[in-house]
Amino acid sequence: MKNSDLRAIPSVDAILRTPEGQRLSAQFGHDLAVSALRDVLSTIRETTKAGEEMPPAAQIISKADHLANSWISPSLLPVINATGIILHTNLGRAPLSAETIAAMDAVSGAYNNLEFDLGSGKRGKRSVHAEDLLKRLLDVESAFVVNNNAAATMLILSALARAKKVIIPHSQLVEIGGGFRVPDVMRQSGAKLAAIGTTNRIHLKDYENALEEGAALVMNAHHSNFKIIGFTTEPPQSEIAGLAHSYACPYVYDQGSGALLDTMPFGLPHEPTIQEALAGGVDLVCFSGDKLLGGPQAGIIVGRADLMAKIKKHPFARAVRADKTCLAGISATLTHYLKGEAVEKIPIWRMIARSEEDIRAQAFDWASQLGFCQVRAGFSMVGGGSLPEEQLPTHLISVSVEKPDQVMRSLRELAVPLIARIEDGKILFDPRTILPEQESVFLRQVQHVFSS
Ligand SMILES: *Cc1c(COP(=O)(O)O)cnc(C)c1O
């Protein structure tokens, strides 16, 4: 290395004075442009010392451009879900309806009456916004929306059972996923766990024996992500409710999925609905906003007004309150149910309701446009901690490749990352979970990856 080589490396200031440097600064702002140039020049100093030739000026600029771009590109991106798992927790759960997005958009860019009563001109309560819709839809006394269902469960237990006993069957002390374990949540809330029954069998008598000793709550949690089959029994909700009430003990149900529609007409097994739980005499039901409800992330509590009053007053309620976009989005999604248009308007219900023939026709159409794939029968899944392992017949596009893992990586590196499935060394795409507005990008990107 000659000293003259090092001296030939331009300074940041010198580069910024050139037209290209000025363009860089205009694009990213002065400070970011300086940081990027400093990083690039310091690397060049090292490589030049090590004997490499200094790159031309244009390359310095393009490296700095690349680097600055990598700093400001968002890490949270839209992706194409071709896995066929409708509620994919890792892929953001439920995509939203157009009306829901519009409602969330409308309140984010402007001031709004989040906590302002337009009638009286005085301070209002944020909780009213979705509450009236939930009351009308579910015929409940009261409703409350929080950040997510984990928070809803925690809040209910903290407000109603702190330092008191909560009766729950052994079989329901489950881990929902992502570290959410019912027993841990109960302990965190300060409630004392009284687990009853055995893993497979629980009788009304088990509840009765525990209630005899006194308890603040009877709680049930839906086995949303696993099944107990074989020699099992569980009393019906209405009997548990009747018994709990005879001991003046409230009965709470963590339903989880937020199913408001019966899943059976779509060829799926029965998923317990919110309405059934309420009809069975459950005092409070809580569920997620972004599972089978098909809305934005939220936790929704519905039921008895006297219990809800304690919940709304608890200090923890403030810590887990829903924001304006969530309330606007949940309200818009609930409106679809009220209008009886949920299956047509809510993306996840459209996907669940989509016929196998329709998907088959689309798969064959795409395969013929692409030219290098086969179509074969397979299954989609509801996923997302609801309807465990339940499958919906579908048709998949399949591509045989030599190195499937490598191809999967290329698919993930696309401008709109494409998440697919591998089975028997083949790449599989399920049309069911590809949104209609993503169709052309999907086809263009697949063509691009497999032609190169
Ligand atoms: C999914 C689920 C939760 C957690 O809900 P989040 O909205 O993800 O916080 C809690 N309980 C049950 C039964 C669930 O299915």
Image (cartoon, helix red, strand yellow):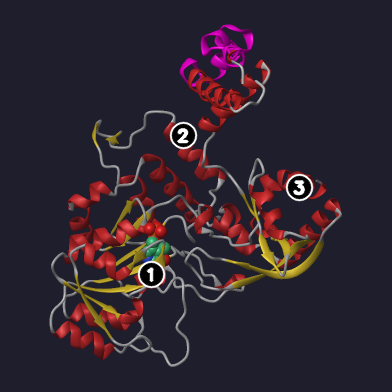
Which sits earlier in the primary sequence, circle 3 or circle 1?
A: 1
Q: Identify the residue at horizontal 46%, vertical 39% (top origin).
A: 104
441 vs 350: above or below:
above
Circle 1: is it few (<14), some (14-19), or many (20+) Cα within 10 Å?
A: some
Where residue 441 appears, as percent x and y from the top left, is 71, 43
Q: Which mark is residue 106?
A: 2
What is the CA distance from the residue labelled 2 to the residue labelled 1? 37 Å
Q: Say whether residue 47 is visible.
A: yes
344 vs 68: above or below:
below
SS for callout 2:
helix
Amino acid carrying mark 1 in the image? Glu
135 vs 8: above or below:
below
Determine if the magenta segment contains residue 151: no
What is the CA distance from the residue labelled 3 to the residue labelled 1? 39 Å
Q: Identify the residue at horizontal 71%, vertical 54% (top origin).
A: 407
Amino acid carrying mark 3 in the image? Val
What is the CA distance from the residue labelled 3 to the residue labelled 2? 38 Å
Where residue 71 appears, as percent x and y from the top left, is 51, 31
Q: Which mark is residue 175?
A: 1
Where residue 346 appears, as percent x and y from the top left, is 56, 53
Magenta stretch, residue numbers: 4-32
Q: Identify the residue at horizontal 54%, vertical 20% (top origin).
A: 37
